[in-house]
Image (cartoon, rainbow, N blue to C red):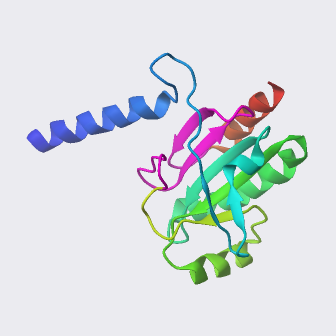
Amino acid sequence: MKNIARCAFVAAAALVWACTPSTPTGEPEVAPALSGKTLDGKIASLSDYKGKVVLVDFWATWCDPCRAEIPELLKLQAGLGGKGFAVLGVSMDGEVSAVASFSAKMRITYPIILNGGERAPQGWVVPGLPTAYLIGRDGKVLRRIFGSKSLAKLTSEVEAALAK
């Protein structure tokens, strides 16, 4: 009984935290710094996208829901990329070769930061995969998304953020 109560408490706390991407004052929090090496050996950074709406997508090649939504993210970027939207992927895989072959097979066109394992980058909370953060033009977290994403809802949220 103790374990069930503990799990329920943790789940409830995570849900509250996930639904409130803001500081104690109610203001949206600024997204933590994020940068790292990409498949082509360059450095990608969230700060490179200043003034854009960005979806930071944490995923892994071994995560079936992550794999399933990548074509949708590619469509979203293709449709809204010219309006100031970008996807920045963060691979939580330990092996670069798996990411490279998967990226080529899926024809991923957005940058993928190679995190080098399942430990979240400093300042980011990634309780499971997929996890994504929608970041506004001002660099503040608009929404945390734990689990699979609804393309229709995400498209609507991105369009609303672009309109600001």
In terms of image quadrants, where is residue 134? top right
Q: Mark yes or no: residue 1 visible.
A: no
Q: Answer above or below: position of 107 versus 88.
A: below
Q: Is residue 80 left or right of residue 132?
A: right
Q: Answer above or below: position of 99 versus 25.
A: below
Q: Position of residue 64 (x, y in %)?
A: 52, 65
Q: Residue at x 57, y 25 (%)?
A: 28
Q: Residue at x 31, y 38 (%)?
A: 11
Is 33 part of what is drawn in magenta?
no
Q: Mark yes or no: residue 36 visible.
A: yes
Nearer to the camera, 150 or 19: 19
Q: Residue furthest left?
A: 1
Q: Residue furthest top?
A: 25
Q: Quadrant of the C terminus?
A: top right
In terms of image quadrants, where is residue 141? top right
Type of secondary structure dominating the magenta stretch: loop
Q: Position of residue 156 (x, y in %)?
A: 74, 33
Q: Answer above or below: position of 111 versus 25.
A: below
Q: Position of residue 57 (x, y in %)?
A: 61, 53
Q: Quadrant of the N terminus?
A: top left
Nearer to the camera, 68 or 18: 18
Q: Residue at x 16, y 36 (%)?
A: 5
Q: Position of residue 76 (x, y in %)?
A: 78, 49
What is the count of numbered marks? 0
Q: Is residue 102 left or right of residue 58?
A: right
Q: Residue at x 73, y 63 (%)?
A: 111
Q: Give the residues drawn in magenta, as a range.
A: 121-149
Is 137 part of what is drawn in magenta?
yes
